[in-house]
Each structure stands twice: as structure tokens, then as C-alpha cells.
Amino acid sequence: MADIILETQGLTKHYGGVHALNDANFKLEKGEHVAIMGDNGAGKSTFVRQITGVEQRTSGKVIFDGQEVNFAGPLDAREAGIETVFQTLALADALDVPDNLFLGREKTKWDWLGPFKFLDYKAMRADTLAALEKTGVKIPNIRNTIQNMSGGQRQCVAIARTASFHSKLTIMDEPTAALGVQETSQVENIIRTLKDQGEPLILVSHNMRQVMDLVDRIVVFRRGRIVANLRKEETDGQDIVAYITGAKTGAEFEGAA
């Protein structure tokens, strides 16, 4: 049996009387790339927020790398090995590119001074340049603050940060929604690199062409529920859209397993 890196059992999130996510059963194998699709409000981003600890679930279990987890926040998820690019990017506008790439995991020097530590800016700048080269992201001046960058550059910085550190799982929530053709191509190349390195990935996307090019499996959400779990080679865009719109109900579906 293939190793499972992530599993959710009955994952549910209610906001008062609004049932944003209901009984989501999901499994992701090590090295597998899975797309999550669905219309706006289908529960896709809610699902990601429960996995990464951005929000606390109403009920259900999250099992990551063989252990049940209850992350208090996204930093806990990162420390456990989950790197995430959120739609909101979660960048610090007043900081430059190296400071953002190493935010929360800064490199220090002269640690022998005991409680007094100094940031190693030279090492962080060098590693930032190497990371950008590795991912194919082009930033003319890494000393520029994020607030002085275009939307596409900001998105690329967030993605480079995620792809620069070895992780057990990468999650990307609509990573190319605000990007042009060239920047989208860069992001897709990063995703292919992660696949070549055997790193599992969850991709939340509306882009059908992108999904069919990049992933192994498609999980469809509708009205807070998983309604389809489809192998890429056994489906097509028309079939996926039918589940997204409700033309196919997924009544026979008992969980993404």
C-alpha cells in the first residue's frame, strides 16, 4: 500500500449556521499531485485553512505523515513540513525579498554569544538569489520592499518562498490567478520541479488546462462536500465541469480515498 502523507477524516467547518465544509474525507499519497476544483464558495479554501491551522475545524481529524495533528496556526503547519501559498500571499509589505523568504526562519551568526544573536543578511541574500535562480523567478532588485512590487512579482516571491525549502507537502491556493502568461509558466515549472523531486502537492485551481497538465488526480468540491475523486487519465474537462456545476451529482461518491 502506498504511503499516505495526508489524510482527513470527516473534516467539517461550520460558521454559525453556514456549513462551509462537510465530512471531507481525503487522502494524498507521498509524491502525488492532486488538484482541488470547484466553484466559488464550494469549500476549497476552507478545506485548506483547516489543514494548515489558519482556522480551527468544527469536527473531524487531520492525519499528517502518520500522526494526528491539531495545528494552532500556519507556523505550526510549516514547522511540521507543510509549505503553503495562500490567496492572500501572507507577505510582509515593509520587508524586502530575503526578509520575506526567511520570515520566521531567519539565519543568524555569532550564535556563540549566547542570547545575543545577529541576523546573517549576507547568507540570506545569497540563499535568496540561489532560490530565485532554482525556481526561475526573476526579481530585478531583491532589496526592493514587497509594497513596491507588482502583483505578479509578489505572487512569485510567495511561490519562491514555498518552493525554496524542502517540505513534506506543498499547498498552492490559486497560485496563478493574478499572473500573466510568462509568470504562470514559471509557476508551472516550479510545480513540475516539485513533482520531479517527489514532493507531494495540493493545487487549488480554476484553470482546467493547468490542472490537466500538472496533476495526477482531481478532487471536486461542491457546496462544502467532496463530490468526485477522479484520476486524470480517466476523465476530461467536460466531466469535471459536470461535477462542478451539479450536472453530475456525485450521489454514488462516498469519499475521496
Image (cartoon, rainbow, N blue to C red):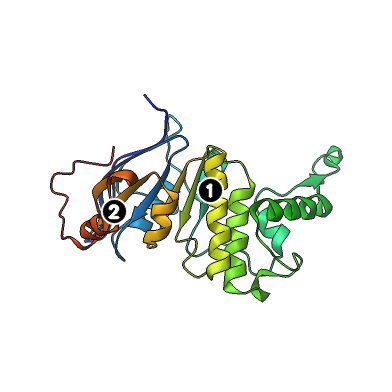
Q: Nearer the viewer, residue 37 or 195?
A: 195
Does residue 98 appear to the left or right of 173 in the view shown?
right
Q: In percent of the image, x 71 and y 54: which residue is there?
A: 133
Label 1 secondary element: helix
Q: Residue furthest left?
A: 251
Question: Neighbour class for label 1 at 10 Å: few (<14), some, many (≥20)?
Answer: some
Local crowd size for mark 2, using a 10 Å CA cut-off: few (<14), some (14–19), many (≥20) = few
Above or below, 16 against 32 in this view is below
| Label located before the other in sequence (2 or 1) | 1
* Residue 175 located left or right of residue 245: right
Residue 55 location (% of width, % of height): 40, 54
As displayed, is residue 88 above or below residue 193?
A: below
Question: Which structural element holds mark 2?
Answer: loop
Regarding residue 62, the answer to whether it shows in the image is no
Residue for badge 2: 236
| For discs 2 and 1, the disc positioned in front in the rendered view | 2
Residue that mark 1 sits on:
192
Q: Position of residue 1 (x, y in %)?
A: 36, 24
Q: Is residue 254 visible?
A: yes
Among the 4 quarters of the image, the one containing residue 90: bottom right
Q: Is residue 80 above or below residue 127?
A: above
From mark 2 to mark 1, how far is it between C-alphas?
21 Å
Residue at (73, 54) in percent of width and height: 128
Estimate the x, y position of residue 28 in percent, counting from the top left: 39, 38
Which amino acid type corresponds to the residue marked 2 in the rendered image?
Answer: Asp
Q: Is residue 11 left or right of residue 75?
A: left
Q: Amino acid at mark 1?
A: Arg
Quadrant housing the C terminus: top left
Residue in view at x 21 percent, y 59 percent = 242
